[in-house]
Amino acid sequence: MDYHEEKKNDVTQEGCDFDDGVDAASPHTDGGGGNLADGYNAFLEFLKTPNVEADNSATKGATATSDAREHDAVNTATDPSPAKEEPSHARMGEKNVSLMTKAKLANGVDAPRMGQKSQSLMMLDRGCPFSGATGKMSRKQQMESLRNLNVRELASLGRTTKGKPRKLTQIPRGYRLETTGIRIDFIKPSTSTATKLGEKVFRGLIYAVSLTKNESSSKQIMLRVLELPKRNTPWWNGLHLRLQENEQFIVEIQERQEGGTNTNTKWVDSFAPVTIEPLTAFTVQDEDIAWLKTSIDGTDFAKSDLLFAELSLTKKSSTILNEAKDTNIMSRQRKLGSTKFEPSKPDAAEVKRNENMLHELLNTENPMTLQDQVHMKDIWNKCLGWIGMTGEHFVESLFLRCPDLLHHTFGEIPAELAFDMFVSIIDMAVRDLDNRTEVIGRESYRGAPLRPDIDAPFKTLDEGFMQFAQIGMQPRHWKEARVLFNIIMRNVNPYLEEDDEEMLCLGVESCVYRFWTHHIMKPALLAIKEVDDIFYSEDHRHKLSDSFKSLAEDKVRAGVLFYQNLFKTYPEVIPYFGRTDMDFLASHLFDAVELLVNVFNDFEKALPILRHLGKIHDIAKIPVFTYGAIGEVLDMTLRMALPQYGNGTPEGDKLAKLWTSLVNRTVLITSRISFVSERMLRKAFEWVDQTARELKWDAAYLAKRHFDIENEVRTKGTYTHTEEEIVHGARVAWRNTAKCVGRIAWNTLMVRDRRHVSNLNQIFAECLEHQRLATADGSLKSVMTVFAPRQPGTRMGTRFWIPQLVRFASYEIEDGSLIGDRANKAYTDECIELGWKPPEPRTEFDVLPVVIEDTVSGLVQMFVLPKEYHKVTMIEHPKYPDFAKLGLRWCVVPTVTCFTMKLGGLEYGCCPFNGWFMETEITRDLLEAGRMDKQAAIAKAIGVEEDEDDFWRERVAIETNKAVMHSFRRDKHSIVDHVTAQNQFLAHDAREKREGRECPAQWSWVVPAIGGSTLPIWHHEMRDFYIEPQYDYQAELFAVRKESKLAEDEVFDVAGPDENEFERILILYASVTGTAEAFAYRAKKAFRPLKVTVASCQSINPKTISSQCIVGGGVYSAVLFITSTFGEGLPPPSAEVFFKTLGSLPASTLSDVPFAVMAIGSSIYPDFCQAGIDLNKTLAGLGGKQILPLTKGDEVNQQEESVLQWITSVGSLFDLQQKQAIVLAGDSPDYVEDNDPISVELLPLDSEKVLAALADEKDLNDSIRVGASSSVHNSSAAVARLLPAGYKLCEVTMNDELVSFPSEESKKLYRSTRFVEFNLKGAVSQGEEKQDLVYETGDHARILPVNDSSVVLAMCQCLDLNPEQWIHINVEDGPAFTASTVRVGDLMAMELDLATSQGDGNLPLLKCLIKAARSSGDTSEQSSDELTRLEDITELILHSADLAKEEGGEGATSKALMREEARKNAINTLTEEYVTIPDLLQQFPVATSHVSLAEVLDVLPRLKPRHYSIASSSEMNPTKLQLSVGKLTVSSHKSTGKSRLGVCSHFLAARTTAAVTNASVDTPTNDVFLYKFHYARSLRYHGEHFPTTKR
C-alpha cells in the first residue's frame, strides 16, 4: 500500500463518512458532503503530478498572472468586481477545521483540533489586512528597503540594474508575504447558477505547499491550512496565511444550494483546485498589495470567470521598529493619582457652604436677558458642530479638577455615559431657554436634541438633575464645572465669531456665566438640597425604621406578597429569577431593605454594596426594566402592608415620599452597570447585524457573534471586535462622517489592525509605516491604522497630542508677532517645554515632533518625524514667478491623529487616518489669519492691490488654488480639485440612496469654499445627522491638562482670593526637646501640597501674626500652634518671650485669625499640657477664630496617634485629600514640587568635611576622661561630637544588679533592675570646657540612649551601607541633625529611632516603601508580592483609622468599633512581627533596595531621650548621680521569637564601670539647658568587610 492509500485509510478509520450531509447550524464540523471523496481523489492525483509548475494540464488556467494595476480596486473603471462595497471578513481559522481539511493533509501533518490556535493554521503575526488598494514603491524606496542585500542576492531576487525587471523569486529581507483575501468574480454565470428562488453558499480551503523532488518523482507537502467559512458570496478578506520561500498556495472552493426548488444539501466542488505562485505578483517596485488574476474552470463557472487572490508583501514589525529606533527624543513619566476616595457624607463645614451658595442663588433674580438667551443658543449650536471634542474636553477637565468625581461619584460609570449625562443636561437646558425656536426648518449642525434614543440617561431636566444629586454630585463640583464650561466655550469652540468672543470676555457678565449659574447650578443645587433634606434627617430615618418594624416582624409574609404582586403585574420578569423558592426570595429582599433603612442617614456607605450587587445582576443578565418594575410593585406592596403609607394624610404622604426616594436612589445606583452593559450590547448587536447584512454573513455565524459578545460584555464590561468588524467598521465610519466630501472611496480604505501594539515606540514606528504605505508609489492611498480601544475603567487610553502627524510649528518673534502655523502655537510651546529644540534658524515650516501619551501608565514620549516620512510640496504658480519666492510649501499626506472611532459601543482613541487633500483646504490653511496668514503676501506676489476692489480676496484665493493644484500635479502627488470632489460627492450620495442608505452631510463642510454657488451641490439638500460607526474629533490632551488648572479669577476676572489655589498655612512650634519641632515638620509634610511655613515661636513677633494672615491682608489662611509644656505648666524657655508678648496684646489684635492648637505633654505631671491650654485661651481672647478644639497629646498614651489625628482633622478643613490627588495626577494649579527635604552626599576619607570632623574628634578626645571605652574608634570623641546642646558626657562609676536571681528560671519571672551611678565631675560636651553637672533633689535625669549595635549593623545591611562610610547631610526642610558630617554607623546609633512604632508612626516608612516599589518598574513576582503585602498593611491601618474618627456616643456603631479593634490588631501584629525597623525592611528586600538613605532619614523618627527619677541626694553626693533602672523586655512573639527591648534601659544595663555616658539633668527651676546626660557607647561593628557603598 502506498502512502496516499494509507493516508486515505487512516482518515476513513477515524469514522468519517464521506456521504454524510453537513449540519446547517455547524457548517464547519466534520462531514464535508458526498462529493468530498471525489475531491479527495482529485487531490491525490494532484499530488502525484510530476511537475506542477510545468504541467498546466493538471489545473487548467492555474498559472497566475499579475495585473494589479489593471484590477486595482481603487480604479473602479477597470475593476471587474461589481460596483458595490468590497467585503472584508473576519480573521479566518477561528473555528475547527472540517473533514475537508483532514483529508488533504499529507506527509503526516496533523490537522489542528477544535479551538487550537496553531501557528500552522493561523499565523498570529498579524499582517496588513488591506482590501482593494495597491501601489508601487519608488526607486529610492526600493533601494532603501534592500540596502542590506548584496549583489548576488539582488540577482537572485530578479533585481538587476539593466534591462526589464523580472518577477521576484525570493522574499526581501525584513518583509513578510501573506495571502490576505480571495474573491471570485462571475463574468458569465452558467445556467445552473441561476436556480430559481435559490441562494448559493460557499466555503473553501487555502493551504500553503512546498515542492520536493527526488530522482524518481516530485511531491507537494502541505505546510499550513486556512479554512474559508461559509459565506453567501465567494468573497473572503482579512485572511492571514503566511507564505515562506519557495511556497505556493492552493485554493479550493465548494458550494451548495440552500432554499429554492432544487435544493441540494450536498457540498460540491465549484472548480478544480487552483495553484498560485505568490511571488509572481510582485516586481521590482515592491507593491505592498497585489491582486493576482487567475482564470478558473468548472461545471458551474464559465472559462472567463476569474479568481482574484489578494497578496500582501509588507515589512515585519521588527523591521519597522528598527527603522524608527532613533526617533524617540524624550520620555517622561507622569505621576498618577493613587489616593482612594471613600464615600462619605458632607461634613458640617461643607453643608454650611452649600447652604450659603444656594441662598445666594435663590436671592438673585435671573439676569439673562433676551439677548443673552439668543447668544447662548447660538454659541451652543456652534459648539454642537464639534461636540465630540468640546464635550470630552469638558468632562475630562472636570475629572482632573475634581478627582473625587472620577473615583467616587462616577466610579462605575464609563467615560461615554458621563459624557452623555453632562452634554445632555446642558443641551436640554439650552433648548429650554426658548422652546419656540426648537421647531427646526432644516439642520445647521444638529437640530434634534442629543441622544434622543432609548439609551438616553434621562428624559427630562428635573430627572437629570436629580440623577446627578443621587449619585453624589456636590455644589462645589457644579461651581468648578462653571469655570470649565466658560473656558471651553471660549477656547475650544472653533466656530466662534467676533461678537461671540466679545460676549465671552465679559466674565461674570457673560451669557455663558449667567446661563450656568441660573439654569444649571440653581436647579442642580435645589436637587441636591432635596436629596440631602431627605437622607440626612435623623427624623426621616426613624420614620422609615418605625414603619419597617411591622414588615420586619414577618419578612416572609411581606416578601411573598411582594413577589405575588410582581409576578402577577409583570409576568415577563419571572425568567430572570433563578429560583422560585418564595421564602428565600422574600427573606433576601427584605434583608436588603433593612440594610438600606439602617444606612439611610449615611447612604454613601451603601454605595459599594449596591454597585457590587449591580455587577452581580449584570452578570445574571437581569435587564434594566425589571428595576422599575420592582420599584412600582414595592410601592404597591407597602400600600397594602402599611395602613399609614400614602393614606392621603400629610404624614402618610411624607412616609410614601421617603420610601420612594430610598427605592429610586437604590435603583439608580444598582442599575447603572446593567444600563451600561445593555447600552453597549445594543450598539454591538446593531453593528454586527449591519455587518452581517452588508457582508452577507451566514446566519449561524451571526448568532454565534451575538452569543460571544453578550458573554464577554457581561463578564468583562467590554468585548473584542473581529478583524473583519474592524476593517468594515473603519470604512463605514468614514462613510458616515458628515464633514467629509471625499467619501466615494470609503470601501477602498486600507485598514491596518494593530490592536496588539501597545508600546509607544512601536506605535510611532507603525505610524511611520502608515506614512510609507500611504505614498509608496507617489499616488496617495487612504489608510487607517487601528490601535487598541479604550478599556473599561480607563479615561482616554493612548492618545496623540498632535492633531496630524505632519504639522508646522509656530513661534513668537522679537516684535511680538507670530510666524508659522498659528493653530499649532500652543502645541509648539508644549513641545519646547518638554525638551524639543527647534532647528536654527527657525522657519515657518519647521515640522513639529509627535508626542504620544499612554494615560493609563502615565508615560509621555516625543518622537521626531524623519524627513523621508513627511513629504512636502513646494508651492509655485505657473504664471507668477514671485509666488515661488514666498517659499510656501505643504505636506502631502493629511494623516489625522485626533479621531476617536466609535464602533459598536467601543471607542478607538488611537487610530491615525489619512485620505487626500482637496486643494481648497490647503488654500484656506495658507490664507487664513489663524493659520499661515499669507493672504497679503500672496496678493503682493501676484500683483493684486488690497484696496483695488472688494473682490481682491477671491482673486488671491483662486490663484492660490491654481498654484496648489499645479505644484501637486508637478510632483505627481494625489490631490483633488473642488469641482471634481463635488461631483464625486453627488455620485456617492446617489449610490448610497440606491443601496438604501441615507447620506449624512454638513452643508458648510461639503460645499466648497470657492465657487460653491456655481456648482450643482449648492442647491443639494442634505441632512446633518449623527450615526455610528463614526469618527469624533478628540480634545487636545495637553490643553485639557493645562486648562483644567485655571483658577476662577483667571477665567472671570473676579476679585478676591482664588478658592482653587492651594492655601498657605503658618505652623509655629515651641519645643524643649525637639518633639514639638519634629511634629511641626511632620505636619508640613502631611499637608503637602498646601504651602506651609514652619517657624519657632521665638522667631515671630506676635504683633505681626494678624498682618501675615489673609484677614489682615497677608497670605496665610490659618496659624497652627504646636507647643510642649515645661516645668510647672510653663511654656518652653525659648518661647517665654513670645507667650509673654502675646498675653499683653489688646483684645482685638487677632480678630478673625483662624487658629488651632496642638498641646503635647505628659499626664504624669499635674500641669498636663498647661502651656497649650493657656495659649489656646489667650488666642481666643484676642479675637482669634478657633477652627478646631484644643487637642492634647499625652506622651505616655499614644501621643503620636493624637497628633496624627489632629493633622488629619486640619487637612480635612482644607480639602487636603482632593488636592493631594490632583498633585499625584500631575494636574495641580501653580504647584511646584518641593526639593527633596533631605539630601545625602557620600564623602571620601580625604574630603575636607571628613578631615574637619576628625579634627574635632581629636580635640574632644584630648578633653574626655576615658576609662575602659570600647568604642569602634577607640574614642568617645565621636559620641561627644554628636551630642545635642545641653547634653554632657558622664562616666559610669557603678552598674550593679539589684535583684538576685537564684536560677535561670527566676530571670524569666522578675525584671532586672540596675543601680547605675554617674560621675558628674568634669562632664564634657562639644564646644564646651569640662564642667561639673549639678542637680537638686526631685530633678529628673534625661538620658539619650544609643541603639544596640546588632540593630545598627542590620540597618546598614538592609540599606547596603558601610557603617564606616562618611556622609554629609543637607536638610532643606525639617529639624537638623546634630552633626551634618557623620559616619553612617554613628548616625544610625545616635540619631534615629530604629524600633517600630506602637501607633501610626510606621505609616511614613510603609508609604515610602510602597512608593519605591511602584516607581521601580520591577515587575517580578517577588516585587509584586511585596507591594501587595505593603498595601494591605497600610490600607488596613489607614482605613480603620478613618473609621475611628467617626463621632462616638450613641452614633457610634458596633461596626466602627470592630474596625477600630481591627486597626489596633493590625498595628500590634506589625510591631510584634517586626520589632525593629531592620526586621521590617528585611521582609521587603526588593522594595528596600529602591529606597535611598535620604528617604529613610526623612521618614524615620528621631531618637528621643528617656526620663528617669534621680534616686540620689544632691546634698549627700553633689558629684554623683544615682538611678534605679528597670530593664524593660516585652515578651517574645510566638511566631518570630523576638522580644521588644527597652532601648535606654538595655543600653544603661550594658554600661560597664568607667564607661562614659551622655546625660543631662532636668531642673524645673533652672532657665538654662545644663541638663542632659549621654553615655559612651560600646558599639562594636563587625562589618569592616562592608564595601564602600555607591548609594
Image: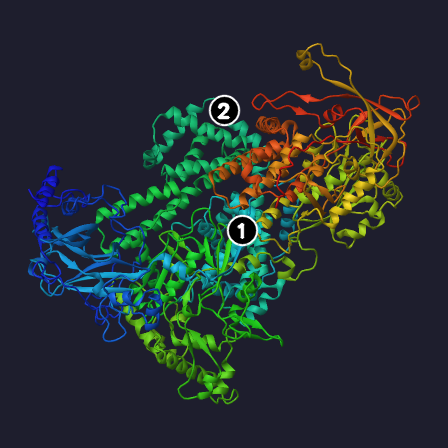
Give the image location of residue 49, x and y in percent. 9, 55
Residue 1542 sits in which quadrant? top right
Number of the front mark, 1 or 2: 1
Instruction: Identify whether 640 is placed above or below 865.
Output: above
Front residue of 1221/615: it is: 1221
Label 1 vs 2, first from the N-terminus: 1
SS category of the residue bearing label 1: helix
Instruction: Identify whether 1502 is placed above or below 462.
Output: above
Give the image location of residue 310, x and y in percent. 23, 61
Position of residue 369 in the picture relative to residue 591 (left or right): right
Instruction: Identify whether 1408 is placed above or below 801.
Output: above
> Is residue 624 in view?
no
Mark 2, residue position: 550
Labelled disc at residue 399: 1
Binning the other alpha carbons within 10 Å of mark 2 as few (below 14), some (14 to 19) or many (20 upward) gives few
| Amino acid carrying mark 2 in the image | Ser
Position of residue 1532 in the picture relative to residue 300 (left or right): right
